[in-house]
Image: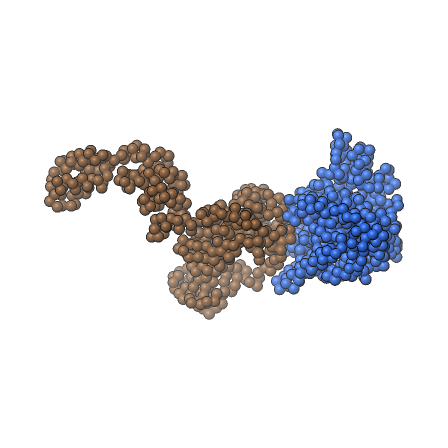
Chain colours: A brown, B blue
Amino acid sequence: MAQDLLNSSKDDALTGFEIVVGLEVHCELLTQTKLFCGCRNNFGDEPNTNICPVCLGLPGSLPVLNKRAVELAMKIGKALNCEILPSSFHRKNYFYPDMPKDFQISQYDQPINANGYLELPDKSKVGVVRAHIEEDTGKSLHIGGSGRIAEASKSLVDYNRAGVPLVEIVSAPEIRSSEQAKAYVQELRYILVATGASDGRMEEGSLRVDANVSVRPVGSKEFGTRCEIKNLNSLRSLTQAIEYEARRQAGLIRDGKKVTQETRHYNEVTNATSSMRSKEEANDYRYFPEPDLVPLVPDASWIEEITSDIQSLLPATKRRNLSSLIGEEYQDQISLLVEIGLDELVLDSVKAGADAKLALNRVINEAAREPEKASRLAVKDFVDLINMESSNKLSATQSKVVLQEMLTSSDHPAEIAKRLGFEQMDQDSLQDNVRGVIEANQAEWGRYLAGDEKVLQFLLGQVMRSTKGRANGKEVMEIIGRLKSN
Amino acid sequence: MSSGIRPPRFGAGKGQIPSTVSELVKLVQKGEIKAQEILEVSLQTIAESDGEINSFNLVLHEQALEDAKKVDASIAKGGFSGRLAGIPIAIKDNICTRGISTTCSSKILANWKPPYDASVITKLKSEGAIIVGKTNMDEFAMGSSTETSFFGPTKNPWDKERVPGGSSGGSAAAVAAGMVPLAIGSDTGGSIRQPASLCGVVGIKPTYGLVSRYGLVAFASSLDQIGPFASCVDDAALLLDVLAFHDEKDSTSLGRDRYQSGNVNIDVSSLKVGIISNFLPNAAESCHQAVTDAARVLANFGAKVDEVDIKELDYAIAAYYIIAPAEASSNLARFDGVRYGLRVDGADVEEMNIKTRTEGFGVEVKRRIMLGTYALSAGYYDAYYLQAQKIRTLVKDAFNKAYGKYDLLLSPTSPTVAFPLGSKVADPLSMYLSDLYTIPTNLAGHPAISVPYGIGEDDMPVGLQLLGPALSESLLIKVAKMLEENNTDKQDN
Ligand SMILES: [Zn+2]
């Protein structure tokens, strides 16, 4: 069946259906220490080295909330346009060897952030129902067989990750395609990185995505039965899993069958989802208020102190700022610019007087190849470069070469241009040079005067050769034009 | 039916041990008596009596001796101001002691040695207390007779055919039998006050948050408090003073200043005392009598005493037996065989969990885990847990209303004197009723003290309970001391 679904064209399988997706994104917070103890929060350390009585859930140990984690959660909330609310913690009870206390401390009916939205680059908005704080679990390693638990001869558990702070961001079921889901996660990732809340590394599990997928006939107001696909750890998995799952569900409905509400696993190798457990087998988590923690009621001044600078860091804000300077029609380039983090270079340069479109072009086409280095460019130098080009002191080709040099050297563009011999010739010597070329190519000059415009390119090439490229093409044309009319 | 005989206090007939801890500490600090000598008295008494009483799960002969030597050395070196310098103390076996088994009197933790000290243990050590051993208790503090212990019951030192009460029965018995002058226990629904009452010693359940719970193996986190046992009010007050400190490791820990600010100077002649009248009808005659006698003494000092009916308290026990098991079912989930404690192997993780818990927990613990799991389950949560929380609020409000009118309340600690071993253990409901008078205090998070007051049926001791609003410990201690001094049956040895 998996093959059939893959081979059938997307349009065939989904014709007449609308995809409905809600995403749950788990984001590991970039704190020094864990959520409820002083152990290091660090990926990749030796197993079971960052542990203590608290994160091991030893009898008698008690949690103490990490202030920094709360601050990062508030930053996320603000960035997602949420209300930041008085909140509390609950226990989510289920037996799981990775979870030292056999319950997870999480926020339940009183999350710290609620009722927000995320604006995507295409200006569409996806509701954010809540973004709450919870603790991560440890990690099992199954030894023997294929590494899957059923075939393993034994299991080892690494509790370094147990108690690492997470924020779970739950979207409304307002996503309507796999592309939009991808855009949502991408945008969310930029936000989490920009606010300093996360390193955004999906491959290390810093961001983990669960997708609730359902389909319904186009035009229907009711939601179809949804399936939750767990642990999608790359954007590719996310889009493929949604595509596969939507087609699977549409196929079932088309065949007159019912979609069963269940949790499903996505296999990257087979590119298919398979059932993990149905709703009937689902755990009863027996949530109840965590008696070892007190309610979390951040006061207004603390919220203000922590979140006041958030708006300016957001990609949507940056895109808006650039669009208003450069123009709505450059939306795609602007999005890219924000994505690679070079928006400020352009914004500041334009504000300092550089030509907006030229600056945008040079950054997107040249500097973007090495965004790390480009981000270290001095705005003033970059502005000078753009000005040299727009005032014809440098040709476009020369400007690009100088910019490449600037990425590796801290020299001023004028110095680099001089070093490379890009200094433009003064009018007199350029005119002498053009005259010399005409004298040496009398036959061609005659054809040109007779009206053969094609010769112009040849003459220009000759001037460029004799000046070793130092001539400005536009000026050469002007001189030739003047000599013709004389 | 056998009858009780008062056991000797700590150090009686064994050299120059004064009758209060504060006097003893002074002697130690002056170098007039050595911590090692005091420890020797303790260990000798344990050797003589504990074979029969079974109050200790573990006695730390070598470690205690080493600690006592350290105290003696620092005193010899030039002084040591520890408030409990050289005082032997017994620790309930649900309080974590680094490298020393902490079993909760359960098979599932029979061999578990915590890698850390509870905050109160760190404090006691820094004040020079000598930890003599870990005391027996009802398994995971679930019980009122110390009979649910995996290591067998503790006997009441007054009459070894009777229970010492529980769940901190080992700590109460160790103090009552003069094996140690001080002990600590934990009180979730009366587990300090009820055994104190049944063993004829003083026990205090502090305001919730006054004493750090870090390192106390949780039974019901929102109700548990560590508190002191001693043979007199002064000693209990001294120990409480040591135990009360702010602890950053416990998010529910209160500031100590708040406790001191409760240290108001109240003139007993202007005191207003309410007797909780709805507790009296089902109390044994001697327990009822103790309240009447105490009321007369207080009235003689000029206090205004009358009866108050606080109906809401009658619902407390029902709410307690939802809330406490609900929290316990979650707190005890971690005993799954994966990381520490007993492990019984199974074909897979789930089977290992089930086998470990089936073999590791006793009947009463299982009963409460099932009760609590049920109360929190989908479809029952609102009807049970939420309803119980509402009652909890009502109880607290009713108390606070009463405290608008009275400075403190008075009741028996327990409905009866110590009952015979085995008489209630098969009937959980009758056992649960032992805590009828103590449970409401825990639901409210308020403090209460149990002080011996008179001798009741079968010559067994009777305990009187003084209850007050949050952080009123100083007042309760003051009034308890007054009653102790005017006890018609004062200890004379
Ligand atoms: Zn830790």
Please state which of residues B483 and B389 is positioned toward the viewer in this rendering: B483
Figure quadrant of the N terminus of chain A = bottom left
- Relative placement, left or right, of A114 versus B220 is left
Figure quadrant of the C terminus of chain A = top left
Where is B83 relative to A90, above or below? Answer: above
Residue at position x 16%, y 43% in the image = A455
Total numbered badges shown on the rendered structure: 0
Please state which of residues A323 and A334 is positioned toward the viewer in this rendering: A323
**For residue A463, what is the image quadrant?**
top left
Where is B393 relative to B68, above or below? Answer: below
Residue at position x 65%, y 61% in the image = B386
Q: Position of residue B239 (x, y in %)?
A: 76, 43
Please state which of residues A113 and A248 is positioned toward the viewer in this rendering: A113
- Relative placement, left or right, of A259 versus B93 is left
Where is A260 relative to B165, above or below? Answer: below
Residue at position x 11%, y 40% in the image = A443
**For residue B134, what is the image quadrant?**
top right
Q: In the rendered image, is residue A466 in sight?
A: no
**For residue A177, what is the image quadrant?**
bottom left
Q: Position of residue A216 (x, y in %)?
A: 45, 66
Where is A422 relative to A123, above or below? Answer: above
